[in-house]
Amino acid sequence: MKNLIPKAWLLLALFIAVAARAETVDPNLAGKEILSEKPLNISPGGKKGLVVVFLSAHCPCSNS
């Protein structure tokens, strides 16, 4: 039990240090439409959720 408290403080300090250095991700996505090859920009709007689904005919996980 004596070693548990210093380890908990060390873990908390490590978590805070990692969280402080975390970078934010740009929520806007840019790409192009496959068929027309027109530019496509997707951004979340207001309080609505945004779901992006990536489909592929070849699964890299099933090759293992």
Image (cartoon, helix red, strand yellow):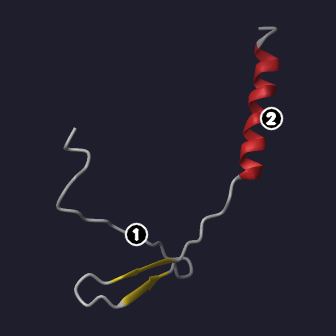
Answer few, some or many: residues within 10 Å of disc 1's Cα (few below 14, many 20 plus, some between 14 and 19).
Answer: few
**Mark 2 and 1 residues: CB-CB less than 8 Å, in contact?**
no
Q: Residue farthest to the top?
A: 1
Q: Amino acid at mark 1?
A: Val
State which quarter of the image contains the N terminus: top right
Which of the 4 image quadrants contains residue 35? Answer: bottom left
Q: Secondary structure at mark 1?
A: loop
* 2 is higher (above) or lower (below) than 45: above
At x 68%, y 59%, the residue is: 23
* 16 is higher (above) or lower (below) than 42: above
Which numbered tag is attached to residue 13? 2
Which of the 4 image quadrants contains residue 51? Answer: bottom left
Which numbered tag is attached to residue 51? 1
Q: Amino acid at mark 2?
A: Ala
From the viewer's side, name the closer residue of 32 and 54: 32
At x 30%, y 88%, the residue is: 37
At x 19%, y 43%, the residue is: 63
Q: Secondary structure at mark 2?
A: helix
Which numbered tag is attached to residue 40? none
* 61 is higher (above) or lower (below) than 50: above
Task: Report the number of numbered marks.
Answer: 2
Q: CA distance from mark 2 to mark 1?
A: 34 Å
Q: Position of residue 41 (x, y in %)?
A: 45, 84
- Number of the front mark, 2 or 1: 2
From the viewer's side, name the closer residue of 6 and 17: 17
At x 31%, y 65%, the residue is: 54
Q: Position of residue 3 (x, y in %)?
A: 79, 10
Answer few, some or many: residues within 10 Å of disc 2's Cα (few below 14, many 20 plus, some between 14 and 19).
Answer: few
